[in-house]
Amino acid sequence: MELPLHKLVLRKLKMKLKNPFSTSYGTVQDKEFFLLELIDRDGNRGYGESVAFTTPWYTEETVATTFHMLEDILIPTLQSNMVTHPDEVSELFLPVKRNNMAKAAIEGAVWDLYAKRLDIPLAEALGGERKEIEVGIAIGIQPTMNQLLEKIQGALDNGYKRIKLKIKPGLDVDLLSQVRSHFPAISIMADANSAYTLGDIDRLKKLDDLNLLMIEQPLGHDDIIDHAKLQAAIQTPICLDESIHSVEDVRKAWELGSCKVINIKIGRVGGLTEAKRIHDFCYEHDIAVWCGGMLEAGVGRAHNIALTSLPQFVLPGDTAGSSHYWEQDIIKPEVIVHDGIIKVPKKPGIGYDMNFEVIEKYTEWKKEYDF
Ligand SMILES: O=C(O)CCC(=O)c1ccccc1C(=O)O
Ligand SMILES: [Mg+2]
């Protein structure tokens, strides 16, 4: 049955992170993003959130390219085509190369609306079965070792199941050894955001002694060849993040032996439909999967929770609780983490209500599109 679309409300928000987030590339303090509210003719409302940052440090997309794609290409495409199922949205967008984060923002709103029309949770619409998900936390590069150790202790006190630390050349083997000696038994992984090359192989081999769960994206953001060479030389599993934009990328990485683990980010792969395809491929090939994060506000976070309810999400992801990032989140209730666990909401769609008071406070402008 056709999704009778009526109107899209696009809001541009800017929210300040409680703590600046530093990686091998630099620091994020303000999160600018779009909140998409897709309304059908029966008054149901589906929500999506864009994840590209202000500058193209993580992938090539930005807040400005997201707006261009939404306004000039993707919204007009949706306005002039009928859809019956959210899977058709990524098909409609096939002629548009890449721009995956812009596509995912709008597709996410369609998925939420679709689940609400069926009166079922988004997790169920995606085929997820978990009632609760285990989550970890990502800690950015800290000014001092003491601050880092304090942050780790705080995360452990909150029950997070796995700690991810950002590393870069010069802040790696020594830093992780010190952390390991303070916390001999905890689950630790490192994320380099592609700060190394194969020239650093001797340094990267030293990480094998530290009992890391995995190392995320050590090499080039667009590489799968050198990662295969590195994986053959080290024991620690490699997880690919930046290199993966589609299930085809996963297939090639798997055939080459470039990694043992995949970080799925809905935005990076162009939406929930492609995320599910990657999940299914990894399920069939017994590749461990976890859900990455983009410092999302509540709507993006809710989509991540729904996705993580699928069976092959066998490792805790980066979906920490709202209060780790924000003074106030845009959803009600906020995402709560108890003993490292989030309960998958049972209400229809993303399962959280919008907190319009907070949304209004952070909205810079809004614009409406009729269907
Ligand atoms: O807490 C989160 O949302 C994830 C933190 C994180 O590691 C990250 C945040 C922004 C951009 C890229 C990454 C990454 O996984 O590389
Ligand atoms: Mg990463």
Image: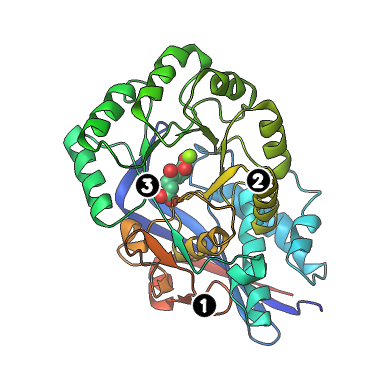
Say which residue label 1 marks: 346
Residue 144 visible here: no
User: Which quadrant of the view contains residue 121?
Assistant: bottom right
From this view, report whether residue 334 is shown above or below residue 294: below
Q: Is residue 299 above or below residue 54?
A: below
Relative image position of residue 310 (x, y in whole percent): 59, 60
Mark found first going from the N terminus, 3 or 2: 3
Closer-to-camera residue (218/251): 251
Q: Secondary structure at mark 1?
A: loop
Residue at mark 3: 162
* Image position, residue 61 (x, y; %): 58, 43
Task: Tell me the crowding category of disc 3: few under 14, some 14 to 19, or many 20 or more residues within 10 angstroms, Cα based.
Answer: many
- Residue 177: percent from the left, percent from the top? 27, 26
The N terminus - image quarter? bottom right
Q: Between disc 2 and disc 1, whose residue precedes?
A: 2
Structure colour scheme: rainbow
Q: Nearer the viewer, residue 245 or 53?
A: 245
Report the residue marked by disc 2. 282
- Give the CA distance from mark 1 to mark 3: 25 Å
Q: Can you tell which mark lies on residue 220? A: none
Residue flagged by tag 1: what amino acid is it?
A: Lys
Q: Are marks 2 and 1 in contact (CB under 8 Å)?
A: no
Depicted 346 relative to depicted 198: above or below = below
Q: Is mark 2 within 8 Å of ligand 2?
A: no
Residue 6 in the figure: left or right of residue 329:
right
Reply above or below: 340 against 97: below
Describe residue 278's horizontal placement relative to residue 304 as left or right. right
Graded by Cα atoms within 10 Å as few (under 14), some (14 to 19) or many (20 or more), the crowding at tag 1 reads: some
